[in-house]
Amino acid sequence: MSGRLTVAPTRQNLLRASRRLDRVLRGTQLLRRKREALVSELFKLARPAADARALITQRTRTAWSALLGALAVQGRDGLRALGWPSRDIQVTLRTASVWGIPVASIETPVRLERTLAERGAPPGPGGAAVSRAAHEFELLGQLLLDAAPREMLIRRLGEALARTSRQVHTLERRVAPMLQTQMTAVRRHLEEREREEHLRLKHVAVRRTP
């Protein structure tokens, strides 16, 4: 950090820099508390999110295995025909705010798992493989749907945490040192000016002394 003076060495500028430094320090403390709160929220979500991801991974393997079995029995064209018509899934979202961060959650639980009658799978040996694959993917979809709001919250909290950390770093490593250096330089110039004025008055007083 350079000690070069970048503002006029006046008491008004010294006072202005002092007030700005005070605001920067108070703002840094607020951002630090916000960062600690964001970290606390992330820790609360970390374990449930990790468990949900592990369960999704396990369910994905099971669903993929069931799909391969259904493909072996019905083939791609057969599964495509059995999958018609497509199914519309609608959810109602509720918006909220966590530390000023907009988030959303599913207001009404949605049930994706269906019975054989609701699914409309054909009877017979081939139908059992298709029903198993459909059942596994319905369970997988349910897990993904339930985990989506939490994953969105984790992502936004992480983004907010990174942004807050950058702000704290900027205030602590750049703005505050710059203001402190500026105040030191102004004080030095004011002190030198006072010493010069004191010496000048002293010389004037000596000259006027008879």
Image (cartoon, helix red, strand yellow):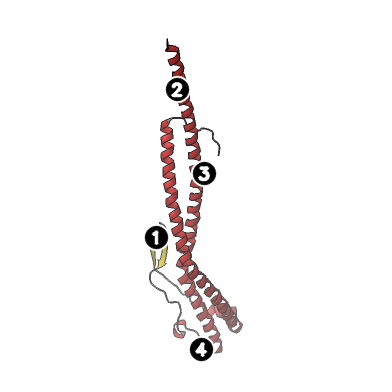
**Residue neighbourhood size for the residue with mark 2, other residues' Cα within 10 Å, grouped as few (<14), some (14–19), many (≥20):** few
Name the image quarter holding residue 94: bottom left
Element marked by disc 2 = helix
Q: Position of residue 142 (x, y in %)?
A: 47, 75
Element marked by disc 4 = loop
Q: Where is residue 62 in the image (x, y as percent from the top left)?
A: 56, 79
Query: Pointers 2 and 1 in contact (CB under 8 A)?
Result: no
Query: Pointers 4 and 3 in contact (CB under 8 A)?
Result: no
Query: Pointers 4 and 2 in contact (CB under 8 A)?
Result: no
Quarter placement of the C terminus: top left
Q: Earlier in the sequence, mark 2 or mark 1?
A: 1
Of discs 4 and 3, which sits in the foreground?
A: 3
**Residue beneath disc 4:** 123
CA gap between label 4 and label 3 equals: 72 Å
Whether residue 48 is situated above or below residue 34 in the rendered picture: below
Q: Residue at x 42, y 74 (%)?
A: 110
**Residue neighbourhood size for the residue with mark 4, other residues' Cα within 10 Å, grouped as few (<14), some (14–19), many (≥20):** few
Element marked by disc 1 = strand
Of discs 2 and 3, which sits in the foreground?
A: 2
CA gap between label 2 and label 3 equals: 36 Å
Q: Which of 101 and 73 is in front in this view?
A: 101
* Amino acid type of the residue tagged 1 in the rendering: Ser
**Residue beneath disc 2:** 198
Q: Which of marks 4 and 1 is nearer the N terminus?
A: 1
CA gap between label 1 and label 3 equals: 31 Å
Marking on residue 97: 1
CA gap between label 4 and label 2 equals: 107 Å
Q: Residue at x 41, y 59 (%)?
A: 102
Of discs 4 and 2, which sits in the foreground?
A: 2
Q: Nearer the viewer, residue 90 or 54?
A: 54
Q: Which of marks 4 and 2 is nearer the N terminus?
A: 4
Marking on residue 174: 3
